[in-house]
């Protein structure tokens, strides 16, 4: 996703042309309605002044299904984000962050799908006084956001699955 710089409704350049991340994690299902997870990522970003690879922050998740039918479920999904990453621009915060979301899950014959919506509060995620050229100065404020995502889980073998997800 590019982070573009707009002036008078026109794109005048990019601060960040590309951000590619590899996310990894593990989860433990305590019982059918409660799951604990841990995750992180490694990212590579390219841009005007940024060209680096860095490890991401650590996420600790709990997913509690408070409704489960034969094919559909609804779950509460809190997350705590711990500032262990080294990136200083788009995806790491120097302070502990929180997320609270709702997951809507559906089971099909050979995969499961999920749609998530939630509120993210990352209090340290503001990048101040960035410059694009000698005259343009701006701040990127990523502290609060509504996150929406969709994904699918494909069972591979017992105890292992592949998760594909897109989050805005």
Image (tube, rainbow, N blue to C red):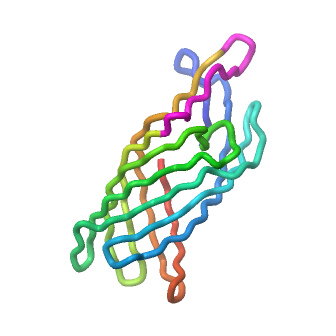
130 above or below 115? above
Please provide the residue range marked out in magenta.
Answer: 122-136
Q: Quadrant of the N terminus?
A: top right
Left or right of 17: which side holds 115?
Answer: left
Front position in the image: 125 or 111: 125
Q: Position of residue 128 (x, y in %)?
A: 61, 23
Residue at the far bottom in the pictured view: 158
Front position in the image: 130 or 15: 130
Q: Position of residue 133 (x, y in %)?
A: 73, 17
Q: Residue at x 45, y 69 (%)?
A: 152
Main secondary-structure element of the magenta-colored stretch: loop
Q: Residue at x 68, y 37 (%)?
A: 88
Q: Position of residue 70 (x, y in %)?
A: 23, 80
Q: Residue at x 53, y 63 (%)?
A: 38
Q: Quadrant of residue 105?
A: bottom left
**Residue 31 is one of the magenta-drawn residues:** no
**Residue 131 is one of the magenta-drawn residues:** yes
Q: Position of residue 60 (x, y in %)?
A: 50, 58
Left or right of 93: which side holds 68?
Answer: left
Q: Residue at x 44, y 54 (%)?
A: 79
Left or right of 1: which side holds 17?
Answer: right
């Amino acid at each position: 996703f590019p982070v573009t710089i707009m002036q008078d409704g026109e794109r005048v350049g990019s601060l960040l042309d590309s951000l590619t991340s590899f996310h990894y994690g593990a989860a433990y299902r305590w019982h059918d309605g409660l799951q604990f997870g841990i995750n992180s990522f490694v990212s590579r970003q390219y841009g005007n002044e940024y060209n680096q690879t860095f490890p991401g922050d650590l996420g600790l998740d709990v997913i509690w299904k408070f409704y489960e039918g034969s094919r559909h479920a609804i779950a509460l999904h809190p997350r705590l984000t711990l500032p262990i990453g080294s990136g200083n621009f788009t995806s790491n915060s120097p302070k502990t962050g929180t997320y609270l979301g709702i997951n809507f899950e559906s089971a099909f014959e050979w995969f499961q799908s999920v749609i998530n919506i939630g509120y993210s509060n990352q209090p340290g995620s503001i990048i101040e006084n960035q410059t694009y050229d000698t005259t343009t100065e701006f701040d990127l404020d990523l502290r609060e956001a509504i996150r929406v995502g969709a994904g699918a889980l494909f069972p591979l073998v017992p105890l292992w699955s592949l998760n594909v997800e897109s989050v805005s």
